[in-house]
Amino acid sequence: MSKKKRTALPFDRRGNAVVFNTYLLNSKKYLALRPQAKVLITLLQIHWRNEKPVDYGIREAAEKIPCDERTASKAFKQLQEGRFITCVDESVFNSRTGSKSRSWHLEWMPFNDRKPNNYWDKKTDE
């Protein structure tokens, strides 16, 4: 028997694809998230790169979700409490040198060629 020739997947060539693990999407912890937190997970993953944390702020999230800044802040807090994300670097506001948004490590994604931590899936001592 001859092997079937492998063809490229028919993704739209105008942009990259965002792929999620179905284990994460079907988990009780993910399903319990508020809708804004679920949208935020997607927005964060769009900016993910293997070699650096994701820089993403509350104002940008509020604009993209769309929602007010308090709701966006609650979405970040829910993802942190659920251990989906970890803050790597705090935001900085400086009118002379410019501002920097918080940096996040996405716990369901690899980082620096290491496996994902998947802290969101681990039991916590409460």
Image (tube, rainbow, N blue to C red):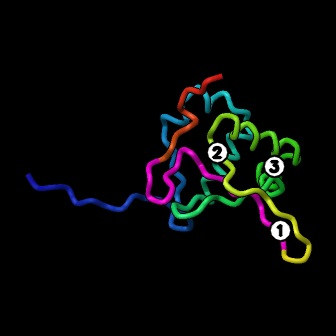
- Report x, y in % for residue 86: 65, 46
User: Of 35 and 10, which appears nearest the observer?
Assistant: 35
User: Of 81 and 3, which appears nearest the observer?
Assistant: 81
9 vs 126: above or below: below
Residue at the image position 77 percent from the left and 49 percent from the top: 65
Residue receiving disc 2: 85
Q: Residue 28's image quarter?
A: top right
Numbered disc 1: secondary structure: loop
52 vs 87: above or below: below
Residue receiving disc 3: 66
For the residues labelled 3 and 2, the Cα–Cα distance comes to 20 Å
Amino acid residing under circle 3: Pro
Task: Please state the extent of the stretch shown in magenta in the rendering.
Answer: 98-115
Q: Earlier in the sequence, mark 2 or mark 1?
A: 2
Image quarter of the C terminus: top right
Pointers 2 and 1 in contact (C-beta within 8 Å): no
For the residues labelled 3 and 1, the Cα–Cα distance comes to 22 Å
Task: Say the numbered circle drawn on residue 99.
Answer: 1
- Report x, y in % for residue 1: 8, 51
Task: Say the numbered circle drawn on residue 14.
Answer: none
Of the two numbered discs 3 and 2 in the rendering, the one whose residue sits closer to the viewer: 2
